[in-house]
């Protein structure tokens, strides 16, 4: 996958809706690329921290010995360049005062609070009790629900984003059907069902 801020730099209608992306949704490259593509186009505002970066990079390296830390750190740097005001800082002092089933997840909630995020996007829904998040006016969203919701806000933007992501897959090239199958494997059935209606332009 070739990543470039120039490839991510198109823009349509912008949104102020802000989401904190958990490491688990940044770990799979196809999902990460799609989320960054849409965030760079300002369909929503994406947030993360250096600690979240470290977490997804560490997990990728465990599963992909063919990749190097320097390669993934370059991806990290390109992500930071592509998405305006993405890095959350000065959130650490909030961590100790938070309660979650797994204390190791508190840094994610702390970053969401510090960045005034509207939602946390994660596969790990059980790790973030809805009642706890509601105290801070934060929603919890599975990435498939979150991406599917984007269709209602900017249908064309999501389709163009998928087209741009597919176009970057050149080694080997992927057909629209190939790309949609990849997204399906990422746990995005609702998103893929919607995109399938536009396979001829993706």
Image: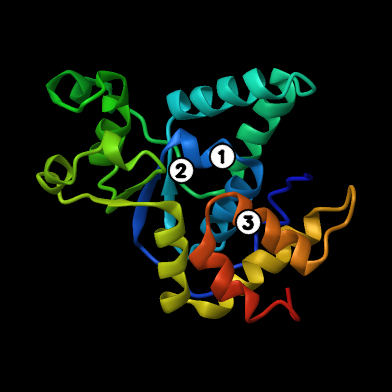
Disc 2/disc 1 C-alpha distance (Å):
6 Å
Q: Quadrant of the N terminus?
A: top right
Residue 8: x and y in percent read: 66, 56
Q: Which residue is mark 3?
A: 183
Q: In this figure, which colouring scheme has been used for the structure?
A: rainbow
Q: Nearer the viewer, residue 133 or 20?
A: 133
Disc on res. 80 = 1
Describe residue 77's horizontal placement relative to residue 142 as left or right: right
Is label 2 in contact with label 1 (beta carbons under 8 Å)?
Answer: yes
Q: Secondary structure at mark 1?
A: helix
- Tell me the crowding category of disc 1: few under 14, some 14 to 19, or many 20 or more residues within 10 angstroms, Cα based: many
- Tell me the crowding category of disc 2: few under 14, some 14 to 19, or many 20 or more residues within 10 angstroms, Cα based: many
Disc on res. 86 = 2
Compared to 60, does 22 lie above or below?
Answer: below
Is label 2 in contact with label 3 (beta carbons under 8 Å)?
Answer: no
Q: Secondary structure at mark 2?
A: loop
Compared to 121, does 8 lie above or below?
Answer: below
Point out the tag, 2 or 3, that comes first from the N-terminus. Answer: 2
**Which residue is depicted at the point 19% across and 28% down?**
100
Point out the tag, 2 or 1, that comes first from the N-terminus. Answer: 1
Residue 184: x and y in percent read: 61, 57
**Which residue is depicted at the point 58% across and 66% down?**
192
Q: Secondary structure at mark 3?
A: helix
Point out the tag, 3 or 1, that comes first from the N-terminus. Answer: 1
Disc 2/disc 3 C-alpha distance (Å):
24 Å
């Amino acid at each position: 996958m070739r990543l470039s801020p120039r490839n991510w730099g198109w823009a349509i209608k912008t949104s102020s809706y802000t989401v904190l992306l958990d490491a688990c949704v940044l770990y799979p490259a196809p999902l990460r690329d799609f989320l960054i593509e849409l965030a760079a186009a300002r369909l929503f505002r994406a947030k993360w921290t250096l600690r979240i970066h470290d977490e997804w990079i560490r997990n990728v390296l465990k599963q992909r010995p063919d990749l190097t830390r320097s390669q993934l750190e370059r991806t990290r740097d390109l992500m930071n360049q592509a998405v305006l005001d993405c890095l959350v800082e000065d959130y650490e002092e909030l961590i100790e005062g938070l309660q979650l089933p797994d204390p190791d997840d508190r840094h994610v909630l702390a970053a969401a609070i510090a960045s005034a995020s509207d939602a946390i996007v994660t596969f790990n829904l059980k790790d973030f009790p809805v009642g706890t998040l509601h105290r801070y006016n934060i929603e919890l969203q599975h990435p498939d629900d979150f991406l599917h919701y984007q269709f209602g806000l900017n249908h064309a933007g999501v389709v163009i984003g998928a087209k741009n992501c597919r176009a970057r897959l050149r080694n080997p090239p992927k057909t629209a059907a190939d790309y949609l199958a990849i997204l399906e494997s990422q746990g995005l059935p609702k998103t893929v069902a919607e995109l399938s209606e536009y396979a001829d332009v993706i």
